[in-house]
Amino acid sequence: MRPTLVRPPVQGGVKFLYCNPFGRLLRPLVTARWVSRLAGFFLDSKLSRPRIKKFIKAHGIRMEDYLPETYKSFNAFFTRRIRPELRPFAPSPEALCSPCDGAVTVFPVTEGGTFNVKGFDYTVETLLRNKALARKYLGGLCIVLRLTVNDYHRYHFFDDGRRGESAFLKGKLHTVQPAALEKKRVFAENCREYTVLHTEHFGDVTQVEVGAMFVGRIVNEDKPAFKRGEEKGRFEFGGSTVILLLEKDRAVLDEEFFSNTAAGLETKVKCGEKIGSRFCRT
């Protein structure tokens, strides 16, 4: 059994912005992209370096797990590279592997194209702002991988394939903590970038990277073709989310993800870990 996460306690700042009437008045300002860009300028500068040691101590980060490097800024530290042997991809080519570290929830996409997260109904069309592409995922699966601040913040290709259509969708930058997901349709409002992946074993999978509060940038590699395990991109400071949209009858996920999601739990996984298998027609 994999470790599970219960709903994390609501932190003071998040509680103020999403649960307090005065905080809700300030929220449009705090979640604006220009505010995150200003924070990003600081986190890219040498002035941010003193934050690194405090962050390591506060979050219990095992620096021996990461490649040795001299960090010129906090963002350089935050996007640190992990030792490859600590994130091996499952050996079977038909294994569906997690593209990143994260806390997983899984939602069936109805034949009408909707899925429900924390009491909110979403549609694939509003997530992608692309009606034709959304139709591909009717009856399929939506896999949500929520990264926390102490996770490895690079994400990888989970299968061999070719890169297809991609788009950046402008929006706000809400936090992706559960407290915010229960108050706002975060995945339909936040800045996000999607890429259609024409994969060898799982059909056309759309991967969506969702920005979060004080994550000013989603940085993706421009690779027309890719191999499983290669780096796809990275998030800069903050927690954030990767969403995988799978077509109907393309993959079978391990049952614990569905049962944990139904119980209100997230399932913790590591990048490269097997989370399901290719669907086999009998």
Image: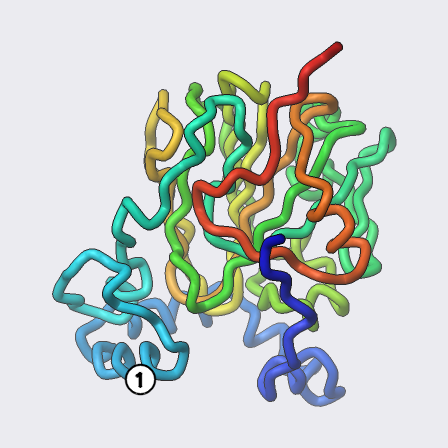
> Horizontal placement of 76 versus 95: left or right?
left
- Quadrant assignment for the C terminus: top right
In the rendered view, would you say 211 is above or below 237? above
Of residue 106 and residue 219, the one placed in the foreground of this image is: 106
In the rendered view, would you say 243 is above or below 49? above
Question: Furthest residue to the left?
Answer: 70
**Which residue is found at the position 57% from the left and 75% from the top?**
29
> Horizontal placement of 21 versus 130: left or right?
right
For label 1, the crowd category at 10 Å Cα-Cα, with few meaning under 14, some 14 to 19 and many 20 or more, is few
In the rendered view, would you say 247 is above or below 263? above
Q: Residue 281: where, in percent of width, then height?
A: 72, 12
> Horizontal placement of 231 versus 144: left or right?
left
Q: Residue 34: where, in percent of width, then height?
A: 45, 67
Q: Residue 165: where, in percent of width, then height?
A: 51, 25
Q: Which quarter of the picture shows residue 161? A: top left
- Secondary structure beneath label 1: helix
**Which residue is found at the position 72% from the left and 28% from the top?**
137
Q: Amino acid at mark 1?
A: Lys
> Horizontal placement of 232 versus 47: left or right?
right
Q: Residue 79: where, in percent of width, then height?
A: 31, 58
Question: Furthest residue to the front?
Answer: 1
Would you name the residue on which mark 1 appears?
54
Q: Is residue 27 visible?
A: yes
**Which residue is found at the position 86% from the left and 29% from the top?**
111
Q: Is residue 34 visible?
A: no
* Colour style of the rendered protein structure: rainbow
**Which residue is found at the position 28% from the left and 81% from the top?**
51
